[in-house]
Amino acid sequence: MLVLAIDTSTPVVTAGVARVLRAHELIALAGGGGLTGPSSMPTTVLAERSVTDAFAHAERLMPLATEALAETGHRVADLEAVVVGLGPGPFTGLRVGIATAAALGDALDVPVHGVPSHDGVAGSVVRAVAGAVGSTDGPLLVATDARRREVYVSAYAADGRRLAGPAVLAPAAVPAWLDEHDVRPAALAGAGADLVAGVLPLPVTAPTRPLTAGLVTRAERALVTDAVPGPLTPLYLRRPDATEPSATKSVLGR
Amino acid sequence: MSPLPPGSIVLGIESSCDETGAGLVRVPEPGGAPQLLGHELASSSDQHARFGGVVPEIASRAHLESMTHTVRSAFAKAGVQRSDVSAVAVTCGPGLAGALLVGVAAAKAYAAAWDVPLYGVNHLAGHVAADTLEHGPLPTPSLALLVSGGHTQLLRIGDLAGDITEIGTTIDDAAGEAYDKVARILGLGYPGGPVIDRLAGQGDPTAIAFPRGLTGPRDARYDFSFSGLKTAVARWVEARQRAGEPVPVEDVCASFQEAVVDVLTAKTVRAATDLGIGTVLVAGGVAANGRLRALAQQRCDAAGLLLRVPRPGLCTDNGAMIAAVGALVAASGAAPSSPLLSGDPGLPVSVVHAP
Ligand SMILES: [Zn+2]
């Protein structure tokens, strides 16, 4: 199954292509004596493109996806599923990825699975997939920049299960939040790791952003079982800024 | 790029403000007008009501929620298949930055998935093109008065596919914005246009002499200003309230509305006459206003000008008008937009389609 992974929850725009083996393909592979090493996992990352530009998500995403597909010898029309990071992240950029994924799914009539973007970070750390880049012996805290002197945080068990979050907090409130959820992380990951390192002096492991491997492995089970995707609801975690005006006051500016 | 042949189908996507629109049109024969096949609209207007104006973040969230449903529904209404689409057009500006990007991202994905060209087009050209869906091709040149919550402009239309020049514009508030603010002063809710138009019908338009902005002999001939009018209404109402007297809401609405449409129509007729243009078009959300339509008709008749106004359903933002611009641009043989297309909140009206 040819899968496109998209994430626009951070200043990094990511598009990657992965092959996910269905159950019968895995069995065939095992029967042929091929069940060793990373290829025994259902997900293999074939190509990935990313660019760091906080203000160019809409501009760059589709060209990156097309390039990554071209590298694998495929076209957009060949896609069989899409996986997209649902955030949390700055709203405008985040929506670009989700709008793109939803439209691709609608245009091609293929399933689109949303996963929390922090899962895409954690999934690359704690799980031995082809393309795993970090490691930890214990629970992991993923943190990203939420601006306004806050961070988005999610906590994971050593086996990759999400234990708490995502939540939006001031860095100083993170230790109490971890206590509340009874999590003792052994490492930090994500682009906001340095923002919590001051209150939580722990080793920082890669990666800083959701990777194709992490995103797709999180959706692996849903993909191979042809599960009906849930709604692609962005993880905004904050209400829109809006204030209700009073009558003449706001008009006359007094 | 060779021109898209007549009969080809174009999908248009609109998300520049608070309406999510998708529309399908057919590319015309040379010199003809695009044919409307069907369109669908989802509005977040209700969600903005208690804030007295469009809240950009709320609009952007609503666009994302409605986009694919709206596109699917447009196809169902038009009775065409996805595989019939030969090009995708999308509003790339002007408009709210975050809102525009939802439509642009979706349109880029649809175009890439179907492997068809993508045209980023100007929202303002779309309002003008909406009229061609109903009344056929525009004579060359034509003069368009574009009035809505976001824009108040006089445009000379040489060619809808590429030659649009701004003759005049508002130097402060848009006309629709003035309606919303006066409605707020009078406690009439949001949006202000329809309710003020209705109450004005029961009031005396000569009851209060509100100022006509930029109509002095030395003022810019074709530009507009509504900020002073809005302030004048606020001060008049406030003075009444302070004196403990009742506010004659119908008379305030009628007098305010008369001040707005008087200036709009007078400057439009003046520009058409000065420039020797025989056809005048009124478009945009405020073009649905009854008094504006009536006074424009009266003054165009008196000046010997032909007036065209699209039906109200095509005056508000919609996807069909964007598909119509896309169809005309594609039929002209213009190159599709770059794969690096993005939104441009300040896209000038002279840029009908983004390179
Ligand atoms: Zn508009």
Image: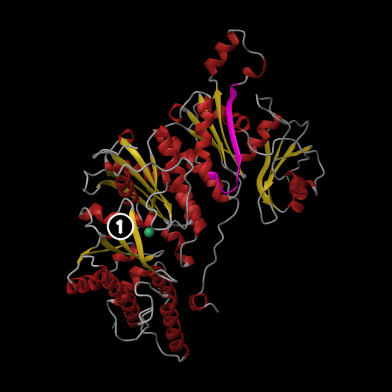
Q: Chain of mark 1?
A: B
Name the quadrant containing residue B142: bottom left
A16 vs A230, nearest the viewer:
A16
Q: In this figure, which residue is indicated by the disc labeled 1?
A: B128
A199 vs B152, nearest the viewer:
B152
At mark 1, the secondary structure is: helix
A54 within the magenta span: yes
Image spot of residue A216 (x, y percent): 58, 30
Image spot of residue B99 (x, y percent): 47, 53
Q: Give the vertical position of B240 relative to A117 (above or below).
A: below
Q: Give the vertical position of A29 relative to B236 (above or below).
A: above
Q: Is residue A110 left or right of residue B144?
A: right
A203 within the magenta span: no
From which residue to which does the magenta span run?
A: A42-57
Image spot of residue A64 (x, y percent): 53, 35
Whereabouts is ligand 1, in terms of quadrant? bottom left
